[in-house]
Image (cartoon, rainbow, N blue to C red):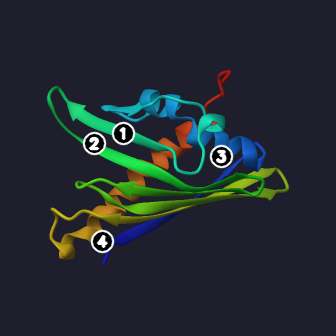
Amino acid sequence: MPAGFMIELTCDAPPDDVLRRVLDLRAHSRVIPLTRVTPEMAADQLAVGAVFVARTSVGPVGFDDPMRVDQLSFRPATVTIVKLGKAIGGAVCIRVDPTTGGSRMRWEQSVDLPWLPQVLQPATARVLRGGYRRILRRLMKASLPAS
């Protein structure tokens, strides 16, 4: 049974803009330490069925985290991404709702690390939550480059 976590963050931008910032794969390569995402593309280039890979490494040692977009809509601002890799499984569901001053993003993620004993997975998910929170804040503040 996968572990999981949830993050809620607010932003002064409209929901579709926040989702575009979070899904801009070009920004992921700049913001996530030791990670490169391929193909690098803008959120508007993503579609249901699109597959991308986040490669995290230090020199030659690392792992691939392949993912597939299973559901995507900018109005309402929602996406579901499934992790397809052997090192990291699970899914990410993002919903961004309008608020009076902008939006609130809700990120829900299940985490399945088949190489880690089941008893350690909930603690690992809590650690991952902190890292994801920092990265998501940076992505939400990033300006969107031209597509």
Which mark sits nearer the N-terminus, 4 or 2?
2
Determine which residue is flagged by label 4. Answer: 122
Determine which residue is flagged by label 2. Answer: 64
Residue 144 seen in this snapshot: yes
Separation of residues labelled 3 and 4 (CA atoms): 27 Å
Separation of residues labelled 1 and 3 (CA atoms): 18 Å
Determine which residue is flagged by label 3. Answer: 19
Quadrant assignment, res 97: bottom right
Q: Which residue is drawn at 54% across and 37% down?
A: 138
Task: Answer left or right for 93 relative to 57.
Answer: right
Separation of residues labelled 2 and 1 (CA atoms): 6 Å
Determine which residue is flagged by label 1. Answer: 54
Graded by Cα atoms within 10 Å as few (under 14), some (14 to 19) or many (20 or more), the crowding at tag 4 reads some
Q: Which image quarter is the C terminus in?
A: top right
Mark 1 is on which residue type?
Ala
Which mark sits nearer the N-terminus, 3 or 2?
3
Does 120 sit above or below residue 132?
below
Q: Residue at x 52, y 45 (%)?
A: 136
